[in-house]
Image: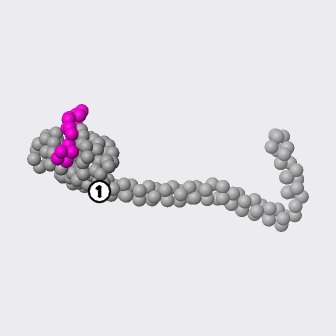
Amino acid sequence: MSALGERLAPVRERYEALAPRERRLVLAAAVALALFLPWQLVWVPLQEAVASAEARAAQRRMELAQMQRLAAEVRALRARVGAAARPVSGQPLLTRVDQGARRVLGDALKGIKEEGKGGVRVRFENADFDALMRWLDQLQTRDGVVVSELVAERQQAPGRVSGRVLVEAP
């Protein structure tokens, strides 16, 4: 007899000792258990996993749709900024920055020089802070330049600053 047969021998003896009615009841319970266990141990976890995966997929589809909407908005903004960034005059960046700085800063302008590829550094002393900020904002919105560095130190007189700014073509 095999090892499994030896282990099941007491169970078989006990089953055979049961009355016929009790045997049918045990057999029905075994069939019910044989159907219930695979259902609970295989089918239900699979269904839960599928439902969870469908929920995650739905969430990912919503996130993708939102990212696509945002990407379209970014493209539209880039197109709008790109159109605004094109200089009306067609002049080089150094010329536009020099003219604007002389107009806005006046005597506070202490130096302008090209820096690197497509950059212009402006040095100023005792400049009107509000006028400086309006000019830099205008450079960014109208001419599309990028203010990549701004160092400003407050002066004794209210609203006056000294420092330097680096503007670069986009």
Which residue is most to the top?
116
- Give the residue drawn at x 80%, y 65%: 25
Q: Is residue 72 visible?
A: no
Q: Is residue 144 left or right of residue 155?
A: left
Residue 93 screen position, x and y as percent? 17, 41
- Give the residue drawn at x 16%, y 42%: 98
* Total numbered badges shown on the rendered structure: 1
Closer to the camera in the image, 124 or 120: 124
Residue 13 screen position, x and y as percent? 88, 53
Which quadrant holds residue 27?
bottom right
Using a 10 Å C-alpha cutoff, classify the residue at mark 1 as few (fewer than 14 neighbours), some (14 to 19) or many (20 or more). few
Image height check: is 36 above or below 167? below
Which quadrant holds residue 35?
bottom right
Closer to the camera in the image, 83 or 147: 147
Q: Is residue 123 magenta?
A: no
Q: Is residue 123 left or right of residue 56?
A: left
Which residue is most to the front?
156
Image height check: is 66 above or below 155? below
- Circle 1 SS class: helix
Which residue is most to the right?
17
Residue 14 screen position, x and y as percent? 88, 55
Closer to the camera in the image, 101 or 147: 101
Q: Is residue 42 visible?
A: yes
Look at label 1 and name its amino acid. Answer: Glu
> What stretch of residues is rendered in magenta?
105-120
Q: Is residue 162 left or right of residue 84?
A: right
> Which residue is under mark 1?
73
Residue 157 screen position, x and y as percent? 29, 51
The N terminus appears in which quarter of the rendering? top right
- Give the residue drawn at x 24%, y 51%: 128
